Amino acid sequence: MIQVKDSTLAAAAEKGMDEFLQVFIDAYLEAVDGKLTAENMSKLNGLQHTLLAWHFFSTEMREGGFVQLIQNGYGGYIFANPFAKAIKQFGAVELGKLIYKAREIYDPNKAVLERETTEEEFNAMYVDFEVFDELEEMYFDMEEQQTALIAAYVDNHITDFAEIIS
């Protein structure tokens, strides 16, 4: 079981929801040595994977949107797993709906979106997949509210996400 210190969690919670969630994310990343592989995926339970997927999703969205998320190898983790359904169960219903809409673009274009690219080809994908732009704007409009819902869910089900130790 993943463990987090109560004192670390309390200090983070005082700073805000992002810092609170980051305590869990950091513990998960430490457990998988910073990178998910087929060998270490079993170290996390389904809820922990959902929270880690949310972390990768939100980080990649802030840095480069759906194109970057997919090009950095997270397409399958987000779209080929029950992430959208699970995040809706966390209360982030609007985020779940957004993921489903993005998947409608991802699925038929998966081969093109996931192929190895040069920097020039990668940059051109932002033009080729402008269809993601509206979804990205929707995400940024809802990000804070959806993050608050996720943080509240984690707080209300904390023992499902980590063992809290002294």
Image (tube, helix red, strand yellow):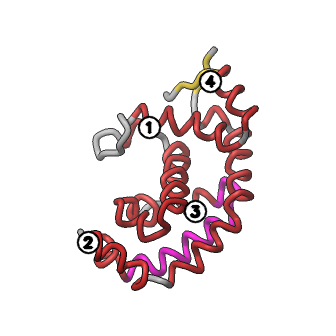
In the image, 35: left or right of 162?
Answer: left
Whichever of labels 4 and 2 marks the residue nearer the N terminus, that label is 2
Q: Secondary structure at mark 4?
A: strand
The residue that label 3 is drawn on is: 85
Disc 1 target residue: 29
CA distance for labels 4 and 1: 17 Å
- Observer-side mark, 4 or 1, equals 1
The local secondary structure at tag 2 comes to loop
Span of residues in magenta:
88-108
Q: Disc 4 designates what residue?
A: 164
- Disc 2: CA contacts within 10 A as few (<14), some (14-19) or many (>=20): few
Assess whether mark 4 and mark 3 are in contact (beta carbons under 8 angstroms): no
- Which of the 4 quarters of the picture holds residue 39? top left
Amino acid type of the residue tagged 4 in the rendering? Ile
Q: Position of residue 120 (x, y in %)?
A: 29, 75
**On screen, residue 39 above or below 53:** above
Q: Under tag 1, what secondary structure?
A: helix
Q: Which residue is mark 2?
A: 115
Which of the two discs, 4 and 1, labels the residue nearer the N terminus? Answer: 1
Q: Earlier in the sequence, mark 3 or mark 4?
A: 3
Tell me if label 4 and label 2 are in contact, CB under 8 Å. no
**Amino acid at circle 1:** Leu
